[in-house]
Image (spheres, helix red, strand yellow):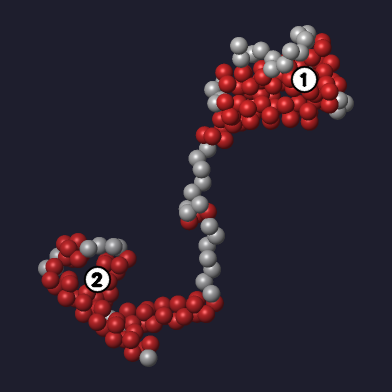
Amino acid sequence: MPDAPATTEPALDRDALDHLVEAVAAHDRSAFASLFNFYAPRVKAYLMRLNANDSLAEELTQEVMLTVWRKAGQFDRTQASASTWIFRIARNRRIDAARRAAKPALDEADPSLHPTSFEAPDEAAHAGARDARVRAALADLPEEQVALLRLAFFDGLSHRDIAERIGAPLGTVKSRLRLAFDKLRRVLDSEAL
């Protein structure tokens, strides 16, 4: 029977168990040993009835009994019996364990969990200069070509979608975009030298 004590301790009544908890509050190790021998197997069986597997029930039982040792001074026999107090601790530990198990594990590769890397000052300066050159090169293009570049790169449209939107043949769109790229490349390559 899982609820039977692990040792041959004599049967303890409610007053005896309450006195044991009060003695544990005074850090009486032998009282704690008696309390542990009486309650540990019962707490483990209770936790297993609450769907904890054997190893989890054992771990939680240890936590419960450690809590009893640490917080025995908070026990108040006028509020509840020692059994009620200890099994309430066990129930709460089981609920905490179930909540921890229900939380999804964090994905360490998730970019939102990593701080954003800051651009080095020299890289920022180079990027700023490059952006200024691109803006200047775009300003020198005919508006028709700039409009096509905006549709392709800012709006993310395919060449076919651009052709449909502006009502031009697909080949015309492709050649105008190629012409715009060639002009940009010439301007930007000459400035890089």
Residue at screen point 63% across, 22% down: 44
Tell me where residue 59 sits by quadrant: top right
Which quarter of the rendering shows the C terminus?
bottom left
What residue lies at 27% left-to-right and 66% top-to-bottom? Answer: 151
**In the current view of this chain or complex, which residue is farthest to the right?**
26
Quadrant of the image for the N terminus? top right
Dot 1: element: helix
Answer few, some or many: residues within 10 Å of disc 2's Cα (few below 14, many 20 plus, some between 14 and 19). Answer: many
Q: Residue furthest front?
A: 8
At label 1, the amino acid type is Leu
| Residue at image mark 2 | 148
In the drawing, what numbered circle is on residue 183? none
What percent of the width, then of the height, locates residue 51? Answer: 54, 22
Vertical position of residue 111 compared to residue 143: above or below: above
Q: Position of residue 110 (x, y in %)?
A: 47, 53
Residue 138 sits above or below residue 56 on the image: below
**Residues at discs 2 and 1 in contact (Cβ within 8 Å):** no
Determine whether, in the image, residue 187 is placed left or right of residue 33: left
Relative height, residue 133 to residue 6 (above, below): below
- The disc labelled 2 sits on which kind of residue? Leu
Residue closest to the eye, 120 or 149? 120
What residue do we see at 67% from left, 19% from top? Answer: 41
Q: Can residue 134 be seen in this view?
A: yes
For marks 2 and 1, the one nearer the N-term is: 1
Q: Can residue 95 be seen in this view?
A: no
Dot in front, 2 or 1: 1
Residue plotted at (50% across, 54% down): 112
> Label 1 belongs to which residue?
35
Which quadrant would residue 137 be assigned to in this image?
A: bottom left
Quadrant position of residue 142: bottom left
